[in-house]
Amino acid sequence: MEIKRKIDAIIKKEFYVKRKHCHFCGKKYGLVPFTCYCGGKFWVIHRHSFAHNCSFDYKSFEREKIRIDNPIVVQDKVSNRI
Ligand SMILES: [Zn+2]
Ligand SMILES: [Zn+2]
């Protein structure tokens, strides 16, 4: 029982330590990680998609975002005029 508890503690500690490192370079990101759309956690230098060879499909995302945002922009212009 004692050994099992020790192993569990080591596994938990390793998991915790791994999560505290940048997914791209392995550098410690400290207290505040930056989570990317691709699901990776990075420190400040590698938080941008171009800095960590991001696998996230930004082109589709931007297209979708523009499509969703456009009606709101049109509405804003109309309400500004009034
Ligand atoms: Zn990094
Ligand atoms: Zn990413």
Image (cartoon, rainbow, N blue to C red):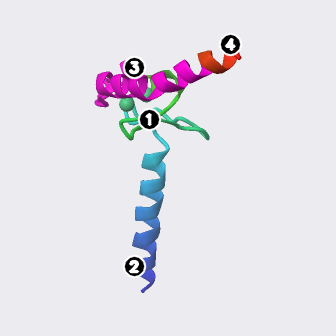
- Give how far apart the Cα atoms at labels 1 and 4 are: 48 Å
Q: Gap between marks 3 and 2, in whole Å?
A: 41 Å
Q: CA distance from mark 2 to mark 1?
A: 30 Å
Give the quadrant of residue 11.
Answer: bottom left
Residue 35, position as x, y percentages in the image: 48, 37
Q: Quadrant of the C terminus?
A: top right
Front residue of 33/15: it is 33
Q: Is mark 3 within 8 Å of ligand 1?
A: yes
**Magenta span:** 49-76
Residue type, mark 1 in image: Cys
Q: Amino acid at mark 2?
A: Lys
Q: Is mark 1 within 8 Å of ligand 1?
A: yes
The residue beneath circle 3 is 51
Answer above or below: position of 40 versus 10: above
Label 3 is placed on what type of residue?
Ala
Which residue is pictured at 46% across the width and 22% down the height? 70
Which element is circle 4 on?
helix
**Element on which disc 3 rests:** helix
Q: State whether residue 78 is above or below residue 30.
A: above
Task: Say what secondary structure mark 2 lies in.
Answer: helix
Q: Tell me the mark number nearer the camera, choosing from 3 and 2.
A: 3
Of all residues, the one furthest to the front in this rendering is 82
Residue 16, percent from left and from top: 48, 54
Q: Residue at x 38, y 41 (%)?
A: 39
Identify residue for label 2.
4
The numbered dot on residue 22 is 1
- Label 4 vs label 3, nearer the camera: 4
- Dot 1: what SS? loop
Q: Badges 3 and 2: C-beta atoms under 8 Å apart? A: no
